[in-house]
Image (cartoon, rainbow, N blue to C red):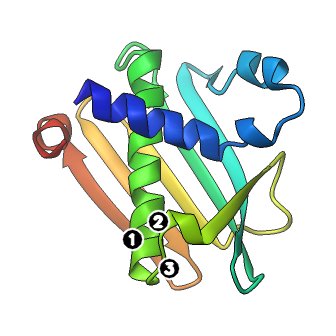
């Protein structure tokens, strides 16, 4: 389990643009998680470009109360679940992650085409995916989450 999370975290970090940075040292020192009002928070914005030059903006966010989850577990779960959801969305469209190039954005250009939000609480995790068709949510307890992973 830890090895899978580590591998997925490295892949997602790669998606976050480290390979495209000219100053990797500064990127490696950048804080991903902020703490606001007693909650860990993370957000990431990506511009996806497909083989036909179509683009899509992806917003990925997560939050969890401090003291309920460690910062390391927060990042690991965000990374692994976020990547799984991106791969699933692409799979539903008949594509793989290899069919898309990712460019990290400092902020969205207008409105995100797809928003993924993970809300972690002491009782479990809720994943929400919002598109122009609405929002789909999946909620599970921590026992269910770790059973599946």
Residue 102, given in percent of the width and then of the height, sits at: 70, 58
Q: CA distance from mark 2 to mark 3?
A: 8 Å
First of labels 1, 2 by sequence position? 2
Residue 141, given in percent of the width and then of the height, sits at: 18, 41
Please name the residue shown 84% across and 45% down the image.
106
Tag 1 secondary structure: strand
For residue 68, above or below residue 138 = above
The residue carrying mark 3 is 134
For residue 72, above or below residue 46 = above
For residue 103, above or below residue 90 = above
Q: CA distance from mark 1 to mark 3?
A: 7 Å
Q: Nearer the viewer, mark 2 or mark 3?
A: 2
The residue carrying mark 1 is 136
Tag 2 secondary structure: strand
Residue 149, given in percent of the width and then of the height, sits at: 19, 41
First of labels 2, 3 by sequence position? 2
Please name the residue shown 44% across and 18% down the image.
72
Residue 76, given in percent of the width and then of the height, sits at: 42, 29
Q: Between residues 121 and 42, which one lies in front from this camera angle? A: 42
| The N terminus: image quadrant | top left
Whether pointer 1 and pointer 3 mark residues with C-beta atoms closer than 8 Å, the reply is yes
Say if residue 121 shows up in the picture. Answer: no
| Mark 3 crowd level (few <14, some 14–19, many ≥20, 10 Å Cα) | few
Whether pointer 1 and pointer 2 mark residues with C-beta atoms closer than 8 Å, the reply is yes
Q: Between residues 101 and 33, which one lies in front from this camera angle? A: 101
The residue carrying mark 2 is 129
Tag 3 secondary structure: strand
Please name the residue shown 62% across and 40% down the image.
14
Q: CA distance from mark 1 to mark 2?
A: 5 Å
């Amino acid at each position: 389990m830890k090895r899978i999370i580590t591998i997925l975290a490295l892949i997602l970090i790669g998606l976050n643009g480290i390979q495209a940075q000219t100053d990797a040292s500064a990127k490696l020192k950048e804080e991903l998680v902020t703490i606001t009002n007693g909650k860990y928070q993370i957000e990431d914005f990506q511009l996806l470009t497909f083989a036909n030059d179509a683009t899509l903006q992806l917003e990925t966010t997560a939050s969890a109360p401090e003291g309920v989850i460690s910062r390391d577990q927060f990042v690991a779960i965000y990374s692994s679940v976020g990547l799984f959801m991106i791969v699933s969305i692409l799979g539903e469209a008949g594509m793989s992650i290899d069919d898309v190039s990712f460019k990290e954005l400092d902020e969205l250009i207008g409105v995100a085409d797809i928003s993924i939000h993970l809300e972690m609480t002491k009782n479990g995790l809720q994943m929400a995916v919002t598109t122009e068709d609405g929002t789909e949510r999946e909620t599970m307890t921590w026992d269910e989450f770790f059973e599946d992973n």
